[in-house]
Amino acid sequence: MGEDLRDSTLSDDLSFLLARASAVSVAAGNAALAPHGLRVRSYSVLSVVAEGARPTQRELAEYLRLDPSQVVAIVDDLEGRGLVERIPDPADRRAKIVTATEAGVRLQADASADARAAERRTHGSLDVGDLPRIVELLRGLAFPDA
Amino acid sequence: MGEDLRDSTLSDDLSFLLARASAVSVAAGNAALAPHGLRVRSYSVLSVVAEGARPTQRELAEYLRLDPSQVVAIVDDLEGRGLVERIPDPADRRAKIVTATEAGVRLQADASADARAAERRTHGSLDVGDLPRIVELLRGLAFPDA
DNA sequence: TATTGTTATACTCTATAACTATA
DNA sequence: TATAGTTATAGAGTATAACAATA
């Protein structure tokens, strides 16, 4: 009863669908990452630097769409646990480059396996063949200026 | 410089793309709705009941994926402004059905126009022909149990 | 003058737990 | 016993503003 709310016009609303899908996904992701002491946010930062990128905090903030002050807090946490390091940018002494430690790379690999498994579980009903198309479309929504 | 972060493997991560796309969309939505005294959350509740649905608060919570206590706060706000009403459910005296007032219906119509315009502006680069497919795919991600 | 990282603050959102009245 | 609405609270996320060091 009442399940016909799904026929509401809100179910055609891009914003609503994105918000709901994101909430589902982030909740599942946070649960899967919790045993590693990570959340979706810190996992994102760790993932970027674990594959060898050497972004400044400002670049991380723009890419992840976080306020620079949020990046400070996340990097503080990861650095305090020995997973990332702040390196002064030789080209700009104001900037700090974030890099992963070996421990950070290892933890990211472990966490990544769990995160991917959780994603498959959460969206198991999804046709695998649709994935590349979904990712392509979502990129356009996630980076609207591109 | 540094913009090659977009080639990061995170850009293939469904959770990350959903979170970023949602953040972009909600921010634009909140900005567009602010002149109407609404946010994406309250607009969603108002929209559901404005088209004639008569859900209980519990049904609203499930559909919008909110905690029942959040629905209380949102309905308190909307009711205090004369936009919705709580009606006791004749079938279950514990439950309260939420309905829109005439003022609520009018405000939703006005707000809806602005919200849709903002959405078109935000995702203007999107091919209109892709929209139905996106909505269909996002429904699957937003309601994974379906 | 403008930008990077930082600190501080306030507000919103998320997640739980507990209470009441009903079922 | 279980459920609907409510209240309360703590933690996470969002948004601004201001400051020191540097460009």
Image (cartoon, coloured by chain):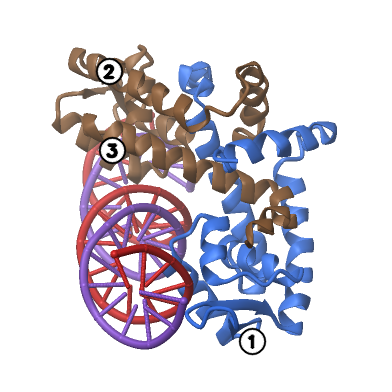
Chain colours: A brown, B blue, C purple, D red
Q: Where in the figure is residue A60, as x and y percent of width and height?
A: 41, 30
Q: Where in the figure is residue A135, as x and y percent of width and height?
A: 61, 24
Q: Where in the figure is residue B15, as x and y percent of width and height?
A: 48, 32
Give the Cα separation between the discs numbered 2 and 1. 52 Å
Residue occupied by mark 3: A74
**Quadrant where the image shows the C terminus of chain B:** top right
Q: Is residue B107 above or below residue C21?
A: above
Q: What amino acid is at disc 1?
A: Gly
Residue occupied by mark 1: B82
Residue occupied by mark 2: A110
Q: Determine whether the residue tagged by mark 1 lies in a helix, strand or loop.
A: loop
Q: Is residue A122 above or below residue A128?
A: below
Q: What amino acid is at disc 3?
A: Ile
Q: Is residue A80 above or below residue A101?
A: below
Q: Which residue is at a point 58% across and 52% down the rendered structure image?
A: B26
Q: Where in the figure is residue B104, as x and y percent of width and height?
A: 71, 78
